[in-house]
Image (cartoon, coloured by chain):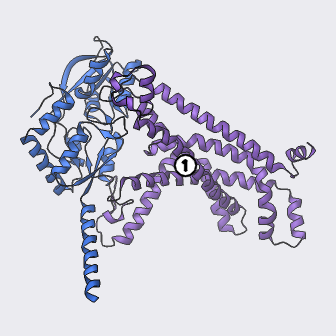
Chain colours: A purple, B blue
Amino acid sequence: MFAYCADPQSLEGLAWLSCYLTTGKHLLFYQSFAFIVALLLVTAPLALGVGFMGALATRSQFAPLRWIGTVYTSIVRGVPDIAFFLFMPLAIDQGLEWMRHKMRCPDWDEPIRQGSDFVVCASAKLPLSSSPQWVHEYYGVVLGMSAFAFVFGAFAAYVLAGAMNAVPRAQMETAEAYGMTRRQATWRILVPQMWVYALPGLSNLWMILIKATPLLFILGIEDVVYWARELGGRKTSAFDFPHPDWRLWYFLALLVFYLALTKVSEIGFSRLARRMSRGQATAAGVKEARA
Amino acid sequence: MKKLILSTAALALTAGLATAESHATTVRLGTEGAYPPFNFIDDNGEIAGFERELGDELCVRAEVTCEWVTNDWDSIIPNLVSGNYDVIIAGMSITDERDEVIDFTQNYTPPSNSAYVALSEDVDLENGIIAAQTATIQAAHVAEGSATLIEFATPDETIAAMKNGEADAVFADKDYLKPFVEETGEFYFVGEDVPLGGGVGMGLRESDTELKEKFNAAITSMKEDGTLNTMITKWFGDDAQTY
């Protein structure tokens, strides 16, 4: 990066460190932090959306929809995250490839499952093996995100359903007295008021989601954990900057990063909670009004 | 006018065919990226090492466009078979067990030695705890003997385990271990070298015979004009075995 970095062997002390910390590989490491934040910002609304639909489903008057909602939340809540995390991307990937295989290669006579191998015709592959590398990488990321949204959606559904039940019954009765239909009352009275009850649960979920992002590593996605391990390992002279096993320092950096991220979100959520309590018939809302 | 449209259509058609052709010959090379000097991620974040240089040259000689991807070692064969990439070029020794699942080209390094490395020279290799990378010929060799085997996903972790005292010694390719012994001064080669495997080759799906022949021819041409030997000496030192 700097001009004096051309010959790393001749460097010492701070100059060496400044060159070492700005190698292309380190820049990829720094990028992966931004990637984690971006991923969280995309995944969280997605999970919230899934959760919202799940919560509405569990409250639905239409029985099959209610069953789907209940089964979804109870199954996901009862299975370890990591098991779902290994299962979901594989299941989605094979499911999509299976469907494409049935559509594109109807006259394929070999079985799809051959022992432990899952073999579909070349044009059914997802992504196609001729597509560029970034497509393959993004495909993996999208699969990971859908797994996150699926798992955390179930928890969010539970939180939101609880919040919906927490909205005072009198509010809904008043809505009915004004002649609103059930649908109108849900959208105009229930949904706007439930967020303050949902917030503590949702902020908790957000924290857990932040801490769950290293699970991407087990899917083979090159995230912060991957680069920390890769950079921290002992380096021989095959590399420009040989050094002993520094994994401790790199994992310490991860620790600081995650702590900072959760601290910032804590501050953000407490502000949001204060704002949402305004004018609400809750203890925090009353306190806010008196102050 | 009609002629113009026709010729444009013909042009578009041939252009389409040409791109289809070039797409068809894009070969994806899968490597581990954690096994210096065979393959590793260099300081620019690019795949580098002996196999990077060799693979690029082989692709030129075989007249195919190549693209590099990395994959964890323990799933490198399943992901080849399921078509995530077309070739394994990852310091993989040719063995009969692997040959049942995938196909190998001829070897591009001669059969080489594996060695033990430890913190001191008086460790018990017979009954001690030996660290090796999962699913390697070295791990299989330790498992057959009387020593206790502990396996790790990356070769780097085997060295760390030995350094921490979790394992008494590391058993791996001598070419991989040599820089650690020569440069750190903390580690020693212990016991006899063990010749294992039939040299390192490229792994391909069993159905990919055409591609295999292309690479076989390319390897032969590099063996004949001496460029392969130069490359081996460049990456593995002057005392490395050559053809």
A255 relative to A178, above or below = above
| Disc 1 residue crowd, few under 14, some 14–19, many 20+, Cα 10 Å | some
Q: Is residue A58 visible?
A: yes
**SS of the residue under disc 1:** helix
Q: Nearer the viewer, residue B10 or A273?
A: B10
- Tag count in the figure? 1
Residue A258, by quadrant, is top right
Residue B65, by quadrant, is bottom left
Residue at 24% x, 37% y: name it. Answer: B91
Q: Nearer the viewer, residue A116 or B113?
A: B113
**Parent chain of label 1:** A
Q: Is residue B126 left or right of residue A148?
A: left
B192 relative to A173, above or below = above
Residue farthest to the front?
A: A3
Percent across and percent down for residue B181 are 28, 19
Residue farthest to the left?
A: B224
B122 relative to B155, above or below = above
Percent across and percent down for residue A107 are 30, 73
Percent across and percent down for residue B5 are 29, 84
Q: Which residue is under mark 1?
A: A39
Residue at 38% x, 59% y: name it. Answer: A127
Residue at 26% x, 19% y: name it. Answer: B182
Residue at 19% x, 38% y: name it. Answer: B200
Quick one: quadrant of the N terminus of chain B?
A: bottom left
